[in-house]
């Protein structure tokens, strides 16, 4: 990862907190950042973690990142274990593996009994253990720790020291700030000091090249064969994969992960057959008939980090036609971002559902429907009314979704997927919630309304009416999301301004002629006069375009103004 001339100031006329920072962060390196209070250490770490964007300069080559913020919020409506599983999924793990790692890390920090405890009831120190666990279970290539030891008990501090050593030995870059000068002393590879907006490297007492100084955890070598064409995703321990000329695959992994790796291979569908197991460096003895000659491995190109210095290996069947390097069994890079994004939406939806903040807009919408939709009314007219009411409700839900996470919790997921995707996930969650409401309201109107025109002379066919009603609800939900996104953070941060602008913008969206929502609603209401169903295809496309444009704009802003 490289920083070139990176500077950050808050506000166009604010003082430069950081200026002209040039930095190279190689893999397998432990970096300490020090400086007095207020000199910009957290600012630098947030830039490194990708939560914040530099005002000037460039950051390139950020690997898969996890971040522990300075202050972690306990007030999330999850249990400790539940939150860690959500975060594990956001990092690309499947649910089972995320749960296993959550349990393991909680146990390592002496908090195994807290897995089912609501986070709001955790002590400050135990919350901090959860904060640290969420970063470590991801086995990130870049681990950014902002005073992560603060609040931990002595045993947990030691465990975090060990975990940092393991991460670096596994090839990661770890950057940390801690006010205790003895923290990781002797293990730090580079120390940078911040002061007066400048970042300077300082001599690190006792620093040695990590390749010779750091204790490497023992490693085990495993060989296996399988009929599967692709190694299972999410293999524990980020094993390094090699292939031999006879079509075998060799995996290299830290000993601490060997049991998990074996279990994952053996329980994979289709399954893998373990043919050998040995300490790294030794030739793997076959568990079947001994091969006449040892396999000659052909290492796959692995972009980053550098190959492990020492390791464990598993061998399996060849994978014809694969892209070189594509099957490196790192649990994360192979996982499509879409899946991680879906995990983030799921997390946001769970957060919304559990926070019960949805109750107020949903009750308001229910009251709106109760007042305006009565049994026996012309169905198209009622569908138009129900859809129109969805627009302000969606704007409200959108505001809730983009503001529901405490900033530190948002920072943690932003480090994993980027602030733009976190913002996008919030908007998708809001649209999803609004569509559920809109679908229920449409179904209610279709069941209770009369399929007749206003003067009750013309029949209204129900299937096209249902389609028109659903698409109109979609239009209103999308326009409502666009309004909500434009009237909340990152465009408007203050609650007062946000509320003050939402109401007039909602009104504009309902009454302005060019608005897709108005077009769709008007189509239903005017069609109700003579019983004509107008399916709002064009308006739906317009609403989709508008919502996509606003999402892109606000997501971009979220990346630069967090
Ligand atoms: N979001 C923000 N908006 C405006 N100013 C900010 C913001 N975040 C940080 N600052 C300012 O930037 C400067 C550096 O803050 P930062 O938190 O990075 O310092 P620090 O070295 O981490 O401090 P500490 O050791 O107390 O944690 C401070 O003057 C702070 O007021």
Image: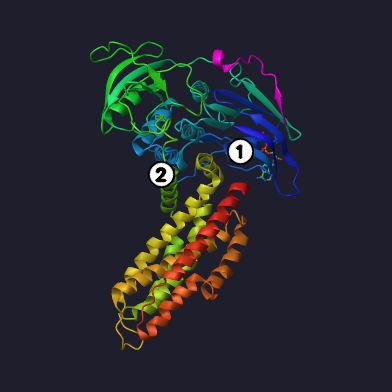
> Which residue is located at x 39 percent, y 81 percent?
527
Quarter occupied by residue 106: top left
Residue 347, position in %: x, y?
A: 43, 46
> Residue under circle 1?
46
Residue 92, position in %: x, y?
A: 42, 38
User: In the shown orientation, is residue 33 left or right of residue 433?
Assistant: right
Residue nearest the observer in this picture, 111 or 62? 62
Tell me: is circle 2 under 8 Å from ligand 1. no
**Magenta-drawn segment:** 199-213
* Quadrant in which the N terminus is drawn: top right
Residue 70, position in %: x, y?
A: 58, 36
Colouring chosen for the image of the structure: rainbow
Residue 440 highlighted magenta (yes or no) = no
Residue 203 highlighted magenta (yes or no) = yes
Quarter occupied by residue 389: bottom left
Which label is found at residue 339?
2
Tell me: is circle 1 under 8 Å from ligand 1. yes
Please say if 341 is above or below 382. Answer: above
Quarter of the displayed picture in which ligand 1 can be seen: top right
Residue nearest the observer in this picture, 520 or 101? 520
Q: Residues within 10 Å of mark 1 (few under 14, many from 20)?
A: many
Q: Secondary structure at mark 1?
A: helix
> Which residue is located at x 36 percent, y 81 percent?
532
Mark 2 vs mark 1: give the one in front.
2
For the question of whether residue 111 can be seen, the reply is no
Nearer the N terminus, badge 2 or badge 1? 1
Residue nearest the observer in this picture, 443 or 128? 443
Kindly indicate whether the residue at mark 1 contacts the one at mark 2 (C-beta within 8 angstroms): no
Please say if 222 is above or below 517. Answer: above
User: In the shown orientation, is residue 14 left or right of residue 446?
Assistant: right
């Amino acid at each position: 990862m490289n920083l070139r001339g990176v500077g950050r100031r808050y506000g166009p006329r604010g003082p430069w907190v950081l200026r002209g920072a040039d930095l190279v962060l190689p893999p397998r390196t432990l970096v300490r950042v020090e400086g007095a209070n207020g000199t910009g250490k957290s600012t630098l770490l947030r830039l490194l973690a990708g939560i914040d964007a530099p005002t000037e300069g460039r950051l390139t080559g950020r690997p898969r990142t996890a971040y522990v913020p300075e202050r972690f919020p306990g007030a999330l409506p999850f249990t400790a274990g539940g939150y860690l599983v959500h975060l594990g999924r956001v990092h690309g793990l499947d649910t089972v593996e995320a749960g296993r790692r959550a349990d393991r890390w909680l146990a390592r920090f002496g908090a195994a009994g807290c897995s089912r405890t609501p986070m709001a009831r955790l002590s400050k120190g135990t919350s901090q253990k959860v904060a640290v666990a969420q970063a470590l279970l991801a086995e990130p290539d870049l681990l950014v720790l902002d005073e992560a030891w603060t609040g931990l008990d002595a045993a947990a501090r030691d465990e975090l020291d060990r975990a940092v050593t393991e991460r670096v030995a596994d090839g990661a870059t770890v950057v940390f700030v801690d006010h205790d000068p003895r923290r990781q002393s002797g293990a730090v590879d580079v120390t940078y000091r911040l002061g007066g907006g400048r970042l300077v490297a300082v001599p690190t007492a006792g620093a040695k090249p990590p390749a010779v100084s750091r204790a490497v955890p023992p490693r085990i070598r495993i060989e296996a064969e399988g009929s599967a064409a692709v190694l299972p995703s999410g293999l524990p321990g980020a094993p390094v994969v090699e292939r031999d000329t006879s079509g075998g695959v060799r995996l290299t992994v830290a000993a601490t992960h060997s049991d998990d790796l074996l279990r994952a291979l053996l329980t994979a569908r289709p399954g893998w057959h373990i043919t050998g197991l040995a300490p790294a460096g030794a030739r793997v003895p076959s568990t079947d008939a001994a091969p006449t000659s040892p396999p000659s491995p052909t290492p796959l190109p692995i972009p980053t980090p550098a190959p492990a210095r020492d390791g464990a290996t598993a061998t399996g069947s060849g994978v014809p036609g694969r892209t070189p390097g594509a099957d490196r069994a790192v649990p994360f890079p192979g996982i499509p971002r879409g899946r991680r994004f879906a995990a983030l939406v799921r997390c946001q939806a769970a957060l919304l559902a559990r926070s019960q903040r949805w109750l107020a807009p949903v009750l308001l919408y229910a009251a709106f429907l109760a007042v305006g939709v009565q049994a026996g009314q012309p169905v198209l007219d009622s569908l138009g009314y129900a859809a129109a009411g969805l627009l302000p409700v969606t704007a409200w839900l959108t505001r809730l979704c983009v503001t529901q996470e405490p900033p530190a919790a948002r920072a943690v997921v932003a480090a994993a997927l980027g602030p733009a995707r976190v913002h996008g996930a919030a908007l998708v969650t809001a649209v999803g919630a609004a569509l559920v409401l809109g679908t229920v309201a449409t179904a209610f109107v279709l069941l209770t309304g009369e399929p007749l025109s206003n003067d009750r002379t013309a029949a209204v066919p129900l299937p096209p009416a249902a389609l028109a009603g659903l698409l109109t609800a979609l239009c209103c939900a999308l326009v409502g999301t666009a309004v909500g996104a434009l009237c909340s953070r990152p465009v408007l941060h203050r609650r007062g301004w946000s509320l003050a602008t939402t109401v007039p913008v909602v009104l504009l969206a309902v009454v302005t002629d060019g608005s897709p929502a108005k077009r769709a609603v008007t189509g239903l209401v005017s069609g109700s006069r003579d019983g004509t169903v107008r399916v709002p295809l064009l308006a739906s496309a317009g609403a989709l375009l508008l919502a996509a444009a606003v999402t892109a704009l606000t997501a971009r802003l979220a990346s630069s103004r967090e």
